[in-house]
Image (tube, rainbow, N blue to C red):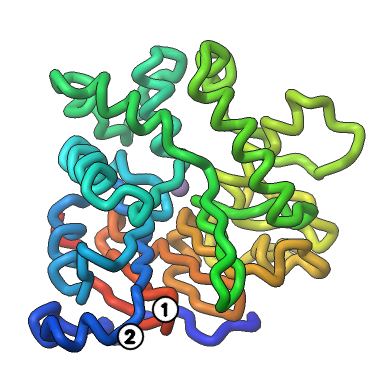
Amino acid sequence: MRQAYRERAGPLFPGRAGSCEDAAVRKRRPRATYAIGDVQGCYRTLRRLLRRLPFDPARDRLWLAGDLVNRGPRSLDVLRWAREQQAKLGGRFRVVLGNHDLHLIGRFLEVRPPKRSDTLDDVLEAADGPELVRWLRRRPFLHRERPRAGERVLVHAGLHPAWTTRQAEALARRLEALIRGPEATTFLARPGDGVAWTRRLSPERRLRAALFAFTLLRTCTAAGRPRPDYSGPPDEAPRGCLPWFEVPGRRSRKATVVCGHWAALGLCIAPGLVALDSGCVWGRRLSAVRLEDRAVFQEPAAD
Ligand SMILES: [Mn+2]
């Protein structure tokens, strides 16, 4: 893999405690963007990680790669926290939708059956549950920006190799409109389709393929067709099965993609890629990366 760093079973990156950096130092350094991986209801670990970050709520930015909820024990707390952060930080807080977030919305709309591993009851039964789901339903699939240092895209799983980042953004906006509207009930009844991106796809098939890429994609064939059947580590993938970000000629390759979703990949920092899912909900760690200098901060799972 063309990677600068990939997580092994090595030591934790302790990061720097917030208290090490005094106010004067904070003022001098440029604004930082901290990107955090899949929280999945692990609220206790999230709070501990946040305490570790030298995050300045008056200046810095916080990005979450989606899958705020499910499988972990404290989804309700995570949602309440996220909504509060949104109110406090405004555009400096960004979160994108993941497959588990969509599953919660689908459960709330009663178009998805419960799965045995679901831990969503606390949200579904809470008095403020409907309000929190309404808030979640208005989150985007993709956040894209072009700071001077280079283009950045935040997405839960990945980008179809055939897409430019502009195309991806346009598809995300169309999907978001659909999820917020009355068609959500039929559309969310099943997950997206991992299909090749061709001109022949109908508009509806296109949106289903986009839903798959944004929320479920991990691997593709060398020709860029998604392989929905493989979720293991990249070095054990069957022949001809590549991480989506390594597909030759991928059209979004000049941007830096910040994503999560692939726990078996682990924290992976490479040119053009910051993959953040380090398996917190599986008892491993929750990771944050400061995008400006790629400093890593990790917290062992505590939920
Ligand atoms: Mn996911």
Residue 194: in sight, yes or no?
yes
Residue 119, how many percent across, how many down?
Answer: 25, 34
Q: CA distance from mark 1 to mark 2?
A: 7 Å
Q: Where's the C terminus, which quadrant?
A: bottom left
Residue 143 as seen in the image, left or right of residue 78: right
In the figure, 255 relative to 94: above or below?
below
Q: Which amino acid, by three-letter code, is at mark 1?
A: Glu
Q: Residue furthest left?
A: 19
Give the image quarter of residue 146. bottom right
Q: Which residue is mark 1?
A: 7
Residue 183 as seen in the image, left or right of residue 197: left
| Disc 1: residue Cβ within 8 A of ligand 1's nearest atom | no
Residue 30, how many percent across, how many down?
Answer: 35, 80
Residue drawn at the location 46% of the way across and 58% of the way down = 260
Residue 152 as seen in the image, left or right of residue 239: left
Give the image quarter of residue 300. bottom left
Residue 147, how many percent across, how many down?
Answer: 54, 69
Label 1 packing within 10 angstroms: few (<14), some (14-19), many (20+): few
Residue drawn at the location 67% of the way across and 60% of the way down = 244
